[in-house]
Image (spheres, helix red, strand yellow):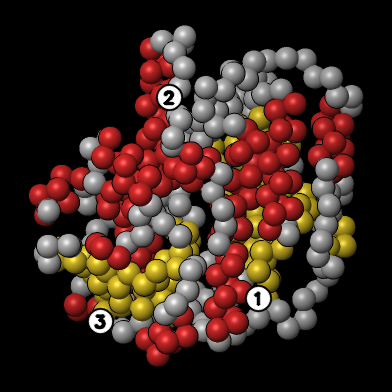
């Protein structure tokens, strides 16, 4: 497990201003709209003319969204960027800039803050994002993080949650449930570590689900792929709280129902293996686990031929009329209402 973040005197001169200078030194820009970044009271971006600006803000709190016992702080810096820009990608837009603010307690050394920003810089470099500012302040407990992601898109390209129509195909990128099972593994090892600090974590062979939890990736390739195919999603959402919850958000906003199929839900073999160890139905992990940061979206049925052979996403069902309800078809043919609160026992009984 990670070494406890003990209190320690800083070696960086000028306190907060010196720390900001170090963060700024590791920051680069790649977008022409970035006129002024870190170092002033506000960032300055040039106008986008016909393009619209999209802004999304997220908060991450220690003890709720992450646990430093087993979360490398550099990894979490990377994850904060991915989670934030995924909200912009879920609008079918291009993420371009991010601002990150930290409230830190005196148990967090400045070297750890710099490690956090090492992760931020790595993600910004990976996805072509400009870090343009933020704030640093003190906190009585742990770390709280606020991130504001900024992006751009034309009026035509912007996609909302409320545009799904009956017969639209329901699609999702990547695979689901891996982040949740990675979290279960880390929580198990934390419990064992707390009971016996001399024990070593047993994490070998679980690289995939650990990576899904600790260092997820944003699905930036989807926007480019669909645009190249001439396909515009009718609705889209970031899978942050589990497939069931996010699909119900689309249906509620679009005033529709839906039908998805158990055997079409993409679940990685390592996720299934870990779920079996915990006696958890992997479908439950996919439906309710969250933290996947995949993109869930709908496209018109007429676009099927354009996207039927792709490596980016899977078709898992279709949008129905509202009065038909929202359901999942199990492998044995049983039809069950799709609800975010479905639990392991419910699905085991259905099988």
Q: Few, some or many C-alpha atoms within 10 Å of disc 2 (few <14, some 14-19, many ≥20)?
A: few
Res. 237 visible in picture: no
Q: Few, some or many C-alpha atoms within 10 Å of disc 1 (few <14, some 14-19, many ≥20)?
A: many
Name the image quarter holding residue 50: bottom right
Name the image quarter holding residue 11: top right
Picture coordinates of residue 169 (x, y %)? 36, 78
Q: Which residue is mark 3?
A: 321
User: Earlier along the polypeptide chain: callout 2 or callout 3?
Assistant: 2
Q: Few, some or many C-alpha atoms within 10 Å of disc 3 (few <14, some 14-19, many ≥20)?
A: some
Measure how far apart labels 2 and 3 are at the Cα level: 48 Å
* Relative side of 299 to 287, left or right: right
Image point 31% across, 46% down: which residue? Answer: 272
Image point 37% across, 35% down: which residue? Answer: 184
Tell me, for residue 243, which label it has, or none.
none
Tell me, for residue 202, which label it has, or none.
2
Q: Which numbered mark, 1 or 2, is in the foreground of this view?
A: 2
Picture coordinates of residue 162 (x, y %)? 42, 76
Image point 60% across, 64% down: which residue? Answer: 220
Verify CB contact (< 8 Å) between mark 1 and mark 3. Answer: no
Res. 1 visible in picture: yes
SS category of the residue bearing label 2: loop
Image point 27% across, 53% down: which residue? Answer: 283
Picture coordinates of residue 161 (x, y %)? 44, 72
SS category of the residue bearing label 3: loop
SS category of the residue bearing label 1: strand
* Relative side of 113 to 159, left or right: right
Picture coordinates of residue 301 (x, y %)? 37, 86
* Relative side of 246 to 261, left or right: right
Answer above or below: position of 156 versus 144.
below
Measure how far apart labels 1 and 3 are at the Cα level: 30 Å
Q: Which residue is mark 1?
A: 153
């Amino acid at each position: 497990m990670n070494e406890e973040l003990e209190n320690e005197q800083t070696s960086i001169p000028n306190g907060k201003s010196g720390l900001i200078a170090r963060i700024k030194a590791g920051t680069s820009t790649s977008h022409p709209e970035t006129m002024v970044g870190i170092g002033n009271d506000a960032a300055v971006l040039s106008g986008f003319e016909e393009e619209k600006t999209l802004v999304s803000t997220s908060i991450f709190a220690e003890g709720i969204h992450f646990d430093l016992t087993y979360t490398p702080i550099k990894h979490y810096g990377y994850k904060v960027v991915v989670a934030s820009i995924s909200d912009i990608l879920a609008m079918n837009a291009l993420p371009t800039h991010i601002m990150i603010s930290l409230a830190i307690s005196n148990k967090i050394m400045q070297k750890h803050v710099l490690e956090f920003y090492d992760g931020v810089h790595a993600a910004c470099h990976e996805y072509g994002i400009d870090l343009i500012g933020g704030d640093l302040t003190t906190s009585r407990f742990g770390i709280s993080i606020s991130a504001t992601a900024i992006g751009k898109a034309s009026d035509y390209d912007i996609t909302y949650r409320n545009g799904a129509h009956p017969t639209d195909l329901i699609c999702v990128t990547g695979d689901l449930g891996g982040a949740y099972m990675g979290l279960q593994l880390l929580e198990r090892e934390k419990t064992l570590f707390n009971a016996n600090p001399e024990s070593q974590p047993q994490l070998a062979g679980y690289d995939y689900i650990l990576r899904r939890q600790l260092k997820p990736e944003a699905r930036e390739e989807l926007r480019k792929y669909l645009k190249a195919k001439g396909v515009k999603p009718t609705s889209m959402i970031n899978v942050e709280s589990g497939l069931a919850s996010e699909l119900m958000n689309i249906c509620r906003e679009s005033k529709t129902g839906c039908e998805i199929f158990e055997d079409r839900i993409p679940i990685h073999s390592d996720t299934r293996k870990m779920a079996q160890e915990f006696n958890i139905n992997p479908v439950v992990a996919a439906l309710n686990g969250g933290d996947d940061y995949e993109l869930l979206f709908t496209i018109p049925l007429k676009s099927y031929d354009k996207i039927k052979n792709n490596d980016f996403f899977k078709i898992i069902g279709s949008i129905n009329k509202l009065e038909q309800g929202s359901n999942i078809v199990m492998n044995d043919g049983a039809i069950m209402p799709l609800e975010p609160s479905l639990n392991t026992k419910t699905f085991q009984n259905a099988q």
